[in-house]
Image (cartoon, rainbow, N blue to C red):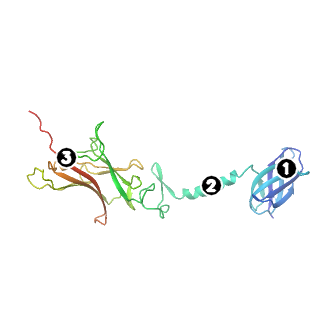
Amino acid sequence: MATQTVQFTAAAGQTGTCKLFAPGSDVQVASVAITEATNRKGTYTAAFTDVAAGTFQVLILSTGGTKLADWWVELLLATGTYFAKDDFLDTEIAAIKVVTDKLNTGLVVDGAVWQWTVNALELAPVGAGGGGSGGTISEAVVVARVPVGGTEGWPKEFVIGDARLTSLATAPKLFVKDIDDIILKSLGTKNFADADFHATLRFAPLTDTTRDLNGPPATIEVTEADSPGIVFNSATLGAEYFELQIPKAKADLGVIKTEYNCQFIMNWGATTVYESSINLGTIKFIRKNSAVV
């Protein structure tokens, strides 16, 4: 047998009954006499027997039927003292905690931040963390590091022999975005930080009748293997980008007056099964001015 003692407060010196009602119900679940504490005047108890576990409205009535107090209590089918509250707050917090505890199992620490576990993302749309279209690329935003007042974007011209380096603050940044304007750090299940990821910046010469050539122009390629080469910068969560470094040795290969189509090619593994390309636009190489003597 379970004796469930409900403790509550009301005006001192009262006699009467404590009645239990289910939330929103006018049907009385149980009713017992109230007993005031000997020294803690205004503190009362009501001893119930084998009331089913649940949340109940606690209505305190005087012997003459006047309402003295109105509380709420959460009972278990177990002997003990249960303290009445003035609202559902404790019950609601407990319910919220059940949900947040479940969410907590789906998180894992990742350095100074947290990320979803593999299981938590198992049924989620594929794509970069944070949502988006599932990694469908609509554009690549390239921000050129240029002097104040200059134009940002993919350069229209490169000077033959001029290196584009992070150390010189001249390497363009490439942000890969999806159709929802979300910056991506992966395509589907393939991450830009994967060990088998390879990036290539390719300059493919186009036919141009104004070219001044001693020979046919060659395709120029820069990869992460060049020194310096392409670097993926993931230091800022949600703002990951590629540093498109172009070493002087590759910049020396440009042919003046030749228009080149520029592509950024992403590949995973030794084959081209997982390959995706982004067109960056066209550029021309121009001659470096000679020194005046």
- What secondary structure is found at the residue carrying circle 2? helix
Foreground: 70 or 82?
70
Q: Is residue 193 visible?
A: no
Give the residue number, with chain letter if any, for mark 1: 67
Q: In which quadrant will I find the N terminus?
A: bottom right
Frontmost of labels 2 and 1 is 1
Q: Alpha-carbon distance for marks 2 and 1? A: 32 Å
**Which numbered dot is residue 134?**
none
In percent of width and height, residue 159 lies at 19, 44
In percent of width and height, residue 170 lies at 27, 42
In percent of width and height, residue 97 lies at 62, 55
Left or right: 271, with 126 as reference point: left
Task: Write down the quadrant of residue 145 in the picture.
Answer: top left
Give the residue number, with chain letter if any, for mark 3: 248
Foreground: 278 or 88?
278
* Kind of residue sitting beneath label 3: Lys
In percent of width and height, residue 137 lies at 36, 57
First reached walking from the N terminus: tag 2 or tag 1: 1
